[in-house]
């Protein structure tokens, strides 16, 4: 591997992970929030793919998670939920100017748990440098009425989320996961390579060699940062890639070779065990969607 390739892998693992499949924001409220409001997970979407953002322009938010736990944001900032936690939001009697968005993480990519996001984190804008151009435009779009408003606001939420993820990673506000692994360039290098070419023959020894570490030291550091073993992490990547390809209508035999499985039977068994769905069911869904689309066209 050339030094240029190595540096690129270390430098921008997150872009590789999010390429064409990044988390999406969907704004469900923007304006003056008064009193109390209740928030819970989105119906019809897997809980493991969900999160939420509350973005405050002015006023304050008091978030009640249960009878004893509260979070308070008393100046402009953001509250990120890395899990679909049921909660109530309370504002002063004068109200608060807020933008609230559901977050949907990709089904076959980095979920909040795999990224290592906390259940929730409160971040005043003062703590995150360089946000003003993003938040300023976000509030202008959210509180005015321009053509394409919803699209613009959702795209700005996506960008704001990325900035928040960077801040959480840089300031050690994450749990074991991909963001934590980026603190160690040696482990980040391997994570980037695994995602780029999951079908390669990735023994732990080869991964350790790329990291420039002994096998034992690499395995221990990998588990410390990601909360799982190199083998289990690789299998998750392979099965995610396999699911995406099968949902695109690729044949099981072809997919097995592309993601590093020796046989289609082994891949089918692994998908059934991990995701409780068979390749045949995935193909049926694909052909049903394709038929429905063709009938519309």
Image: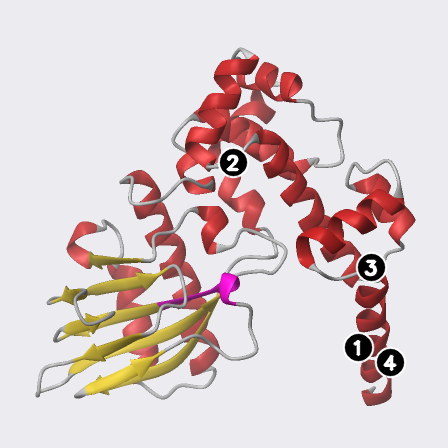
- Sooner in the amino-acid sequence: mark 3 or mark 2: 2
Q: Residue at (86%, 73%) from the top-left corner?
A: 287
Q: Is residue 166 above or below residue 212?
A: below
Task: Look at mark 4 in the image and give the residue it sits on.
Answer: 291
Task: Look at mark 3 in the image and give the residue it sits on.
Answer: 279
- Sooner in the amino-acid sequence: mark 4 or mark 3: 3
The image quadrant where one finds the C terminus is: bottom right
Return the residue nearer the eye: 270 or 151. 270
Q: Secondary structure at mark 1?
A: helix
- Sooner in the amino-acid sequence: mark 1 or mark 2: 2
Which disc is residue 228 wearing? 2
Task: Name the residue at the left extreme.
Answer: 93
Q: Residue at (83%, 78%) from the top-left corner?
A: 288
**Mark 1 Cα shell of 10 Å, populated few (<14), some (14-19), many (≥20):** few
Q: Residue at (82%, 84%) from the top-left corner?
A: 292
Which disc is residue 26 wearing? none
- Sooner in the amino-acid sequence: mark 1 or mark 3: 3
Q: Residue at (14%, 66%) from the top-left corner?
A: 72
């Amino acid at each position: 591997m050339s030094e240029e390739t190595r540096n690129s892998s270390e430098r921008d693992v997150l872009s590789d992970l999010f390429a064409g499949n990044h988390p999406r924001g969907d704004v469900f409220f923007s304006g003056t929030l008064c009193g109390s409001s209740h928030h819970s997970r989105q119906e019809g979407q897997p809980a493991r793919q969900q999160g939420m953002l509350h973005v405050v322009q002015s006023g304050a938010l008091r978030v009640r998670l249960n009878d004893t736990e509260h979070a308070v944001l008393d100046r402009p900032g953001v509250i990120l939920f890395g899990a679909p936690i049921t909660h109530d939001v309370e504002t002063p009697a004068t109200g608060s100017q807020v933008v609230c968005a559901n977050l949907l993480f990709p089904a076959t990519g980095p979920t909040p748990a795999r990224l290592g996001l906390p259940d929730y984190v409160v971040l005043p804008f003062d703590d995150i440098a360089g946000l003003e151009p993003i938040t300023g435009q976000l509030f202008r779009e959210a509180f005015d009425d321009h053509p394409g408003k919803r699209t613009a606001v959702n795209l700005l939420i996506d960008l704001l989320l990325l900035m928040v993820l960077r801040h959480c990673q840089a300031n050690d506000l994450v749990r074991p996961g991909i963001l934590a692994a980026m603190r160690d360039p040696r482990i980040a290098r391997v994570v980037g390579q695994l995602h780029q070419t999951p079908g390669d023959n990735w023994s732990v020894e080869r991964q350790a060699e790329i990291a420039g570490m002994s096998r034992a030291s690499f395995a221990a550091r990998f588990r410390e940062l990601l909360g799982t073993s190199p083998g289990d992490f690789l299998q998750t990547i392979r099965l995610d890639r396999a699911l995406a390809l099968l949902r695109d209508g690729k044949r099981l035999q072809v997919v097995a070779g592309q993601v590093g499985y020796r046989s289609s039977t082994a891949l089918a068994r692994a998908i059934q065990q991990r995701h409780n769905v068979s390749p045949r069911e995935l193909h049926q869904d694909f052909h049903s969607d394709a038929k429905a689309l063709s009938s519309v066209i």
